[in-house]
Image: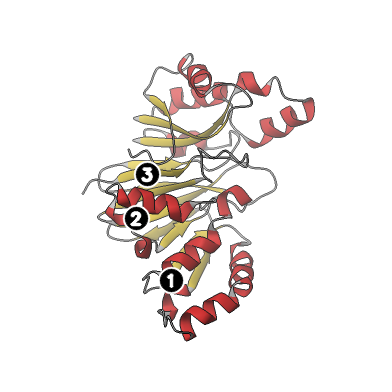
Amino acid sequence: MKSKIVLLGTGTPIPDPTRHGTSVAIVVNRTSYIVDFGPGVVRRAVAAYQSGVAGLRVKNLRKAFVTHLHSDHTAGYPDIILAPGMYGRSTPLEVYGPRGLQAMTDHILAAYEEDINERIHGLEKVNQRGYQVNVHEIKPGLVYQDQNVRVEAFRVRHGSFQAFGYKFHTPDRVIVISGDTAPFTGWLDIYQGCDVLIHEVQSAAGLRSRPPMWQSYHSRMHTSTIELAEIATKAKPGLLILYHQLFHGVSEEDLLREVQERYTGKVVSGKDLEVY
């Protein structure tokens, strides 16, 4: 039972048309598990489905995990509620994430109440259960398990947010997704020996060109290429995938080179719709 990793979106808050909002799909046995839902998530899922990833059919978007509530990770939340509800999802969306997720969900459902009511009670007569959302506000540890995956959440360091990363145990691989984070206490125990580490990163060289205020902010919120190279050297993942790349004015090739100069393992700079 081979797992697939699909990078639905590798973007940041910067409105880059080549990189949609942050989102990663883990697909096992035609079942998808979405981590974060930035802008464009459903359309990216459709693009992946049309390219052969059967688990990303719209009506199969049923399970999602949120790292934190920044907009570049959640602006697609209404879409992942509404579009699958409209196009055949027959069970509630199950969503796991930090404190505040229930309130966000309640406000989204209230904002789209007229639309939802019309879809359900108007001429379309869609399945009401497909629009329902079951929210699970989580703590570190095991947060989800079924016949395909076991999912552990771990706390990360990203400002004052309650923020998490996720560790997926699939039949063939252990996959870790960092979410947005600066280096944090206990990372080695979580990352060590995983098959795939999908990690956010920012260019250390590019950051030095930013104004002092932004240098201070980003260094406290994100992981630099130098820091990530040191982390990966100790953790030894089978594959390191860079995502949520903050280039700070340097090229993608230069950012990747900053990591490769200090880390000799296998590393790629991820792009939207790549499959691993």
Between the residue at mark 3 and the residue at mark 2, the CA separation in whole angstroms equals 9 Å
Instruction: Looking at this view, name the residue that lies furthest to the left.
Output: 1
* Label 1 residue SS: helix
The residue to which callout 1 is attached is 86
Between the residue at mark 2 and the residue at mark 1, the CA separation in whole angstroms equals 15 Å
Q: Earlier in the sequence, mark 3 or mark 2?
A: 3
Q: Amino acid at mark 3?
A: Val
In the figure, residue 190 lies in which quadrant?
Answer: top left
Q: Earlier in the sequence, mark 2 or mark 1?
A: 2
* Label 2 residue SS: helix
Q: Where residue 78 sits: x, y (%)?
A: 55, 63
Q: Which residue occupies 39% across, 69% down? A: 87
Residues at circles 3 and 2 in contact by the CB criterion of under 8 Å: yes
Q: Amino acid at mark 1?
A: Met
The residue to which callout 3 is attached is 6
Q: Which residue occupies 27% across, 56% down? A: 30
Q: Earlier in the sequence, mark 1 or mark 3?
A: 3
Q: Where residue 217 sits: x, y (%)?
A: 72, 34
The residue to which callout 2 is attached is 56
